[in-house]
Amino acid sequence: MTKKEWHQCLEEMDHMFPDAHCELIHRNPFDLLIATLLSAQCTDKLVNRVTETLFQKYAVPEDYVSVPIEELEQDIRSIGLYRNKAKNIQALSRILIEQYDSQVPADRDLLMALPGVGRKTANVVVSVAFNIPALAVDTHVERVAKRLGVNRWKDTPLQVEETIMKKTPEENWSKTHHQIIFFGRYHCKAQNPACHICPLYDRCREGKKRDKKGLVKHEVVTKVN
């Protein structure tokens, strides 16, 4: 996909989801860090249900390290991989206390050095909490990029990130990240994507494959001009 074609896709996503934003509920960078860590292999909706009470009990790193690990595990038990996540939350909280005066660093590399914090989580935090241009690649972003043909199916999340950043103005990285997520979460879903009403159908590699299987109703497709 050319840069021009990609920009046309972004324009359509902007029309569809002009108010796309981070849906993880948080009060500050530390809350966002915890919520994003919890969201790995888990939906934002479930994370928000858990953090609604979690953030009433825990507000600062000191709160998380002051309880037994078993208690924190129970507090996040409904979230996948809760034992490992509880361990990482306590470990990164101790590091924040000891090395950063209990503050979250506004630096991707420093964030990625924290237990349980990968590139995606770090990109979300620097982008949303600190307004630093970044483009986090989650399952939605990766799926959309590969379906549209921006990336190859064998590309890694890092390759997806690098490709989209090259084709997108830096000042739009954060906005683009949220709009692709909304597009993938609410329109181009993993199961039953809305190809039949998709304005990006003519640009979509996956849509054409679905068409060959008789899964797309051409008469109601809105095409990109």
Image (tube, rainbow, N blue to C red):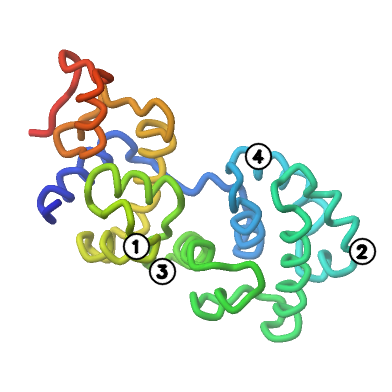
Query: Residue 200: which quarter of the image?
Result: top left
Left or right: where does residue 120 sit relative to residue 176?
right
Give the residue displayed 80% in from the left and 58% down from the top: 58
Q: Secondary structure at mark 4?
A: helix
State which mark lies toward you, 1 or 4: 1
C-alpha distance separating marks 3 and 4: 27 Å
User: Which residue has dot 4 on it?
Assistant: 46
Q: Earlier in the sequence, mark 2 or mark 1?
A: 2
Left or right: where does residue 103 sit relative to residue 144?
right
State which mark lies toward you, 3 or 4: 4
Q: Amino acid at mark 4?
A: Leu
User: Which residue has dot 2 on it?
Assistant: 68
C-alpha distance separating marks 2 and 1: 38 Å
Q: Amino acid at mark 2?
A: Pro
Give the image location of residue 84, x and y in percent.
74, 61
User: Which residue has dot 3 on it?
Assistant: 132
Left or right: where does residue 165 sit relative to residue 202?
right
Q: Amino acid at mark 1?
A: Glu
In depth, the one of 5 and 81 nearer the eye is: 81
Q: Secondary structure at mark 1?
A: helix
Q: Secondary structure at mark 2?
A: loop
Q: Secondary structure at mark 3?
A: loop
Give the image location of residue 64, x and y in percent.
81, 65
**Residue 161: mark:** 1
Give the residue displayed 20% in from the left and 60% down from the top: 167
